[in-house]
Structures are given as C-alpha cells and as structure tokens.
Image (cartoon, grey):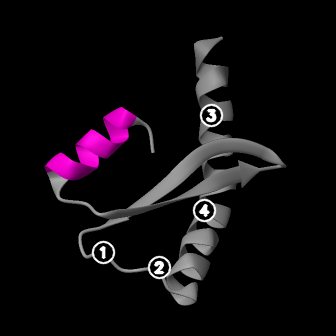
Amino acid sequence: ADPAERQWMTVEGMTTMIGIPVLAAGNVVGLLESFRIVPAPWSRLQLRHARIIATVLGPVISSLQGHQQQQDR
C-alpha cells in the first residue's frame, strides 16, 4: 500500500487489505479492495468470494463506462 493508503487504514482502524483487479474483456476496469479490522489472514473462501464479486463487477463497470461515453458524445 502507498503511504496515503496506509495512513487512511491507520485512521480507520484497518489492519489488513486485499486488492483484486476487476477485469472486463481482458482489460482492468477497476480494483476491488477489501479491508478488515482484525489482523488475520484472508481465508481461501473469502478470497474466492472476492474474486467472484470482481468477476461479476467487471462487465457491469465496463457497460457503465460505455454508457457514459455515449452520453458524453
């Protein structure tokens, strides 16, 4: 994590973070970040759930970006 993100985590009381890239058609369209207060490792099940959420979000974000680009024209 960069210094600003570490500072934010400290202020908010977060101890652990994971970042999962959000992909659509092979392109990164976002980053899903999850935080926890309790310093504990992420379980395989939690990581799998985060990956599933990121997989579902990718096409949705891409679709919204395309919709926004059409409105900007």
Q: Nearer the viewer, mark 1 or mark 4?
A: 1
Q: Position of residue 7 (x, y in %)?
A: 25, 41
Farthest residue to the right: give it.
26
Check residue 54 in the rendering and tell me which mark sits there, or answer none. Answer: 4
Q: Amino acid at mark 3?
A: Gln
Q: Position of residue 5 (x, y in %)?
A: 35, 41
Neighbours of disc 4 within 10 Å: few (<14), some (14-19), many (20+): many
The numbered mark, 3 or 4, whose residue comes first in the sequence reads: 4
Q: Nearer the viewer, mark 2 or mark 3?
A: 2
What residue did someone put label 2 on? 42
Residue 71 placement, left or right of 43: right
Q: Amino acid at mark 2?
A: Trp
Q: Amino acid at mark 4?
A: Ala
What residue did someone put label 3 on? 65
Whole-angstrom CA distance, mark 2 to mark 3, is 31 Å
The secondary element bearing badge 3 is classed as helix
The secondary element bearing badge 4 is classed as helix
Whole-angstrom CA distance, mark 2 to mark 4, is 16 Å
Q: Specify start and end residues of the magenta stretch as a single range.
A: 3-11
